[in-house]
Amino acid sequence: MTITASDMDTNTPAVDDQLGEAGLSFEEFPGGLGADLDTESTVTTGVEAAFLTALMWAPAPMAREVRQIMATGDRWDPFWSGMHREIFLAICAVLDGGAPPNPTLVQAHLFETGRLQKVEGHLLAIISPSRGPMVGGADLPHLAAKVVDQWYRRGYAGLLARMSQIRESVSVEELAGHWENLTGHQQRAEELWLTKRDQLAKL
């Protein structure tokens, strides 16, 4: 669930301006984890890695379909790990060039664009997983759906944190406007989550 400045804007001054140094920064808010940070982080990054592995080994036509659904944008970025996002963007670039996104071509693209060193450790773990993806890419839509679900669940942790901040930092007269704004964001996030899940279920 990604919060942008426009999402947080109401008729009052920007929330981040009101919160100052005491509150969560804008960068911290878009995704949050629950109380068991270590376990949730391990599970989340594990699912993302498995998704990227399956994407690189899936038949190119299916990989292209999933790439279209999962493509990142200004208001949509399902990845918790920045390294995984970099690898996904490299996969997209290989697909957009008309080639299958196999690990060798993805690695070459990262090298040619000067990004391999940054993600090399993560890429090697993905290329050589302890348990490989299903033949034919049968698990790819399911792994993609789980990445989407994790994005949506993280958003609620961020949403609750922001609501708590606002409650402690703004006047009672301003609460309704912020609540309305956050509710609208939640509804847009739910609509996007349902759309992505429906698209993946049809593959």
Image: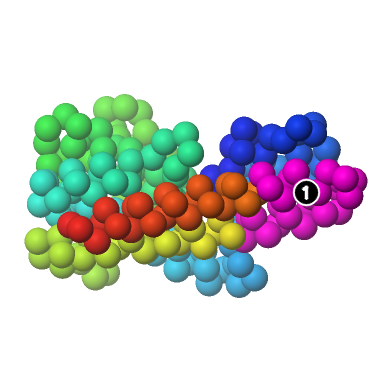
Residue 153 in the image: x percent, y percent? 52, 62
Return the residue nearer the eye: 122 or 173: 173
Describe residue 180's horizontal placement relative to residue 114 as left or right.
right
Return the residue nearer the eye: 95 or 65: 65
Residue lying furthest top in this view? 113
Colour theme: rainbow
Q: Secondary structure at mark 1?
A: helix
Q: Quadrant of residue 46?
A: bottom left
Q: Could you tell me which quadrant the C terminus lies in? A: bottom left
Residue shown at 48%/55% (left/top)? 190
Residue segment shown in magenta: 157-181
Residue 197 is covered by the magenta coloring = no
Residue shown at 57%/68% (left/top)? 38
Residue shown at 44%/52% (left/top)? 191
Residue shown at 73%/55% (left/top)? 163
Q: Quadrant of residue 125?
A: bottom left
| Residue identified by numbered label 1 | 176
The residue under label 1 is which amino acid type?
A: Ala
Residue 84 in the image: x percent, y percent? 39, 48
**Category of crowding for the residue at label 1, using alpha-carbon neighbours closer than 10 angstroms: few (below 14), some (14–19), many (at least 20):** few
Residue 174 is covered by the magenta coloring = yes
Describe residue 57's horizontal placement relative to residue 184 as left or right.
left
